[in-house]
Image (tube, rainbow, N blue to C red):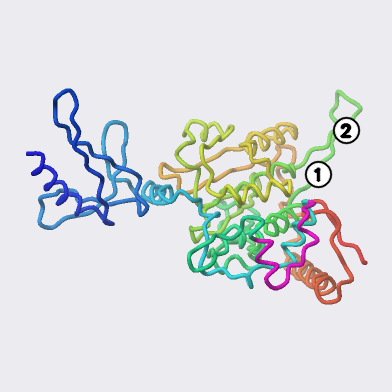
Amino acid sequence: MIEQIEKDMVGYNNLIRPYYQPRLFIEEVDGKTILVIKVTAGERRPYKVPDRITAKQKDFNYYIRYNSSSIVPKDEYERELINLANRTPFDDRGNDLISLRDISTTLLRDFLVEVGSDLADQDLTGDNLKIVLDQMDLLETTPEGFKVKNVAAMMFCEHPEKFFKMTQVEIVIFPKGRLQDPDNMIEVAPIRGCVPKMIRDTMNYLKTNIIQKTIHKPEDTERSVVTYNYPYQALEEAVVNSLYHRSYIEREPVEITIEPDKISILNFGGPNHTISMQAIKEARMLRSRRYTNHRLGEFLKELDLTEGRATGIPTIQQKLRENGSPRATIETDEERSFFLIDIPCNPDCLGGPILKGDMKGDMKDDMKDDMKNFSEIRILRDDFHVMKRVRGLKDGYWVII
């Protein structure tokens, strides 16, 4: 009888896709013959099985455990299952499409200098670049040689959108409100580049054009009170979180929508299911048991752009509270396909123009001037070597050598 069971099991196991066979043992326990089935994690998981084994036309599906039942995962759950099955996070995986030529030695050296690494003095030309990247654990060894990891392109490639489509920040301004006057909008040119550059350029734009200070003097005190429509630190945390925790598999940008009463920041690839929906609704600390882009977070932490301790949302709420602003709210869906945070405008600043000085007409010209200035700096730095960066991306500045 045991032999027949073994034979039947081999037939059933042949229906698993891709091919997988558990190991079978026959053991004697307390005078009884027992068939032991050992099922280990397969290297090619996840696996599909037919809904009905005996059906002539078989439909194959993944299954997950939900409470005491086995169910077919839907949409985002299935994508999450596939992603979880690969124990290596996406940012730490090697990518066949990325070559050493795609890595900017300028961006790499700027980073090494800023974090005070001993590698900052290393030669980054030729094979030396490969040696440095390997020392930084940015290469994956393969039987054929090596692959450059995704996080290397996220951090040190000038055009990571070549490998991660729609990796950019898009800012849209609705002066009268998105619902009130949807046709009246200003679209800012997409912000692209490596992740630190996108963070820096996005915050520069918001600081220059959106963040405004209001000074008023309460009747019961002689001291003036300074408030901001949006505290810089709160916006910075939200922008960093959107680029840190977004999915770089999804072909969607980070979207920032600016209205008279709030700034909304949307990224696709929402919070994973280890975070309770209650914590999300309450917009408090979102502590996850796993992070989508752990390595990216480590690099951003070295640049002091994130703490990496699930403190992003508490920091946003704290800075809003200190500024006298209402709390931020968070939204996602059951599939956790997106993450949307709304940062409200300080009530004392409502009613004024969204853009500083009502700069609608001049904004494109200003942006062109900014891009021209940035291009000139790059020429002075890269071609003539007469300028250098002092300190980091966040609080540094350029000097003439």
Q: Is residue 144 left or right of residue 385?
A: left
Residue at x 82%, y 76% (from the top left corner): 383
Which residue is at a point 85% across and 73% down the rendered structure image? 380
Q: Is residue 369 above or below residue 339?
A: below
x then y, percent, for residue 23: 25, 44
Q: Which mark is residue 279?
A: none
Q: Nearer the viewer, residue 95 or 343?
A: 95
Question: What SS does tag 1 mark?
Answer: strand
Residue 284 versus residue 6 in the image, above or below: above
Q: So how many labels did they put on this image?
A: 2
Q: What residue sits right under mark 2 in the picture?
A: 224
Q: Around disc 1, counting alpha carbons within 10 Å, would you say few (fewer than 14), some (14 to 19), or many (20 or more)?
A: few
Q: Amino acid at mark 2?
A: Ser
Q: Residue furthest bottom?
A: 383
What range is drawn magenta here? 116-133
Q: Is residue 117 magenta?
A: yes
Using residue 26 as the reference point, say whether residue 183 is left or right of it.
right
Residue 344 location in percent, x, y?
65, 41
Q: Amino acid at mark 1?
A: Lys
- x, y percentage for residue 336? 45, 44
- SS class of the residue under badge 2? loop
Q: Earlier in the sequence, mark 1 or mark 2?
A: 1
Residue 213: assigned label: 1
Q: Nearer the viewer, residue 268 or 323?
A: 268
Q: Residues within 10 Å of mark 2 (few under 14, many from 20)?
A: few
> Would you say residue 352 sits in the magenta stretch?
no
Disc 1 to disc 2: CB gap under 8 Å: no
Query: Could you tell me how far apart the alpha carbons at marks 1 and 2 are, in whole angstroms?
Result: 12 Å
Secondary structure that dominates the magenta span: helix
Name the quarter where the N terminus is drawn.
Answer: top left
- The residue sitting at 21% across, 39% down in the picture is 25
Residue 355 shown left or right of residue 332 in the figure: right
